[in-house]
Each structure stands twice: as C-alpha cells, then as structure tokens.
Amino acid sequence: MQLQGLDRMDQINKDDKKNMDHSEHISATDQTCFEEGKMHSCDDCGLVFENIHDLQRHVKTWCPENRKRTRDEDEETIHKKMKLDDDSSEDDDDSAEEDDDDGFDFIVNEVWDDHSTQYDRKIKQLMEDDMSKKDAKEEANDIMLSKDRSLFMKKYKDFLMHMHELNASRLHRMIKQEIIELVAEKDVHIDQAIEQVIKRHRSDFDSLFENYNESDGEDDSEDNMDTKVNTE
C-alpha cells in the first residue's frame, strides 16, 4: 500500500511538471507570436488573442473593462443630455418671461386717450355724490371697462386688417425681411434696424403717393364728366 501511494504521488508530480512545461511552452509561443505581430491584445484589459476575430468577440461580448468604459460613456451622454435639456428649459423659461403683452400698449393708450374725457367726467360726477376720489376712480374704471374693451377690439381689428393688406405688398414683405436680417444676423437693435431700412426705401414710398395722386385725378375727371352731363 505504501509503495502504491509513493507511485501515485510520483505520477502526480510528473503530471504537474508536464503541465507546467506545457504552460511555459504556450506562454513562450504567445510571447514569440506577439513579438512577431501575430497576436492581438485588448486595449481595455490587456488580454492577448491569436486572431482579430477572437479579439472582436471578446470586446463586444464580455470584456469587463470595455463594458465599464461603455457604461461610463453612456452615463456621461445621459448627463450631457440632461444638462442640455435643463439649458433648453431655462431658455424656454426666459422666452416665457419675455412673452408679454407690451405690444398691445399702443392700442390701450389710444383707447385711454379717446375715453379720457368721459373717464374724468365720470370721476367728477361720482365725487359730487360724496364718493372719495379713490373710490370714484375704481368705480369709473368698472363703468368704463366695457366701453374700453369695445373700442380696443375695434382698433385691434383695424390694425389686423392693415397688417393683412401690408403683407400682400411686395415692398412691405421686402422691408420686413431686411429688418429681420439686420436684427438676427448683425445684432442691430430693432429701432435702429427699422430706421435704417425705412430710410433705404424712401424713394420707393414716393411711388405710393404718385399712385394715390393718379387715382385721385381719375376721380376728379369722373366728377367733372358727371357735372357736365348734368349741366347738359
């Protein structure tokens, strides 16, 4: 039994030595192939492969370092996208703050000017009825609101009709486009852009008056013809 045990241990030692020699032989072969440019190594984890196909499969399938790098890149991309979304949201908020109704002020001011006499008269009348000036103003505002609204809507409608007619004009469309280009591309303030473009087209406006004078002359001729006919 003791001899059999010694023989078995001797066989195990021989097998271990054989495996070590084989491993050293493989390592030496791999080193030689790598030095000769026949081996391919993974840039992420450093493992070496005999052909490019094994390397590609390794990178795509299970390379831990590559998967970690890909995950980091994905997280960075998500972070950048979230930052862009936040910036876009801030821009939208800024636009919302700038999206006010100041453009209607010129019509509102016209309405107030047109109704100022009635408004003052109403305040005076209410104060004569023993109402304080503050209460009289509030009461007059409530009374005049419906009248102000009606006049505002009429003026706004007239303005929209004028805009519709202007948009049908080639000259107006050209002027509007030039103003937009100055403001958007050359960062010129809107007031300066309008003034520059209008001055540039001053000669084009002369023809508008010429057309008006011609049409006015035609009306005079028709009136003269009607007068002559009636006289005869």
Image (cartoon, rainbow, N blue to C red):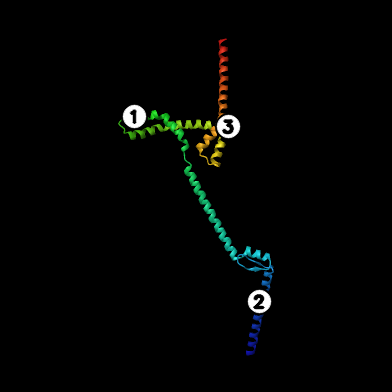
Q: Is residue 168 visible?
A: no
Q: Nearer the viewer, mark 1 or mark 2?
A: 2
**Any part of residue 137 in sight:** yes
Left or right relative to 171: residue 134: left
Labels 1 and 2: the sequence-earlier one: 2
Secondary element at image label 1: helix
Counting residues from the start of the chain, the first of labels 3 and 2 encountered is 2
Contact between marks 1 and 3 (CB within 8 A): the answer is: no
Secondary element under disc 3, as helix, strand or loop, is: helix
Taking the view exactly as shown, the residue that stands out farthest to the left is 130
Q: Which residue is mark 1?
A: 124
Q: Residue at (56%, 15%) from the top-left corner?
A: 224
Distance Cα–Cα, label 1 vs label 2: 113 Å
Comes first in the chain, label 1 or label 3: 1
Q: Amino acid at mark 3?
A: Leu
Q: Which residue is mark 2?
A: 24
Q: Amino acid at mark 2?
A: Glu
Q: Measured from the top left, where is residue 70 in percent x and y?
A: 58, 61
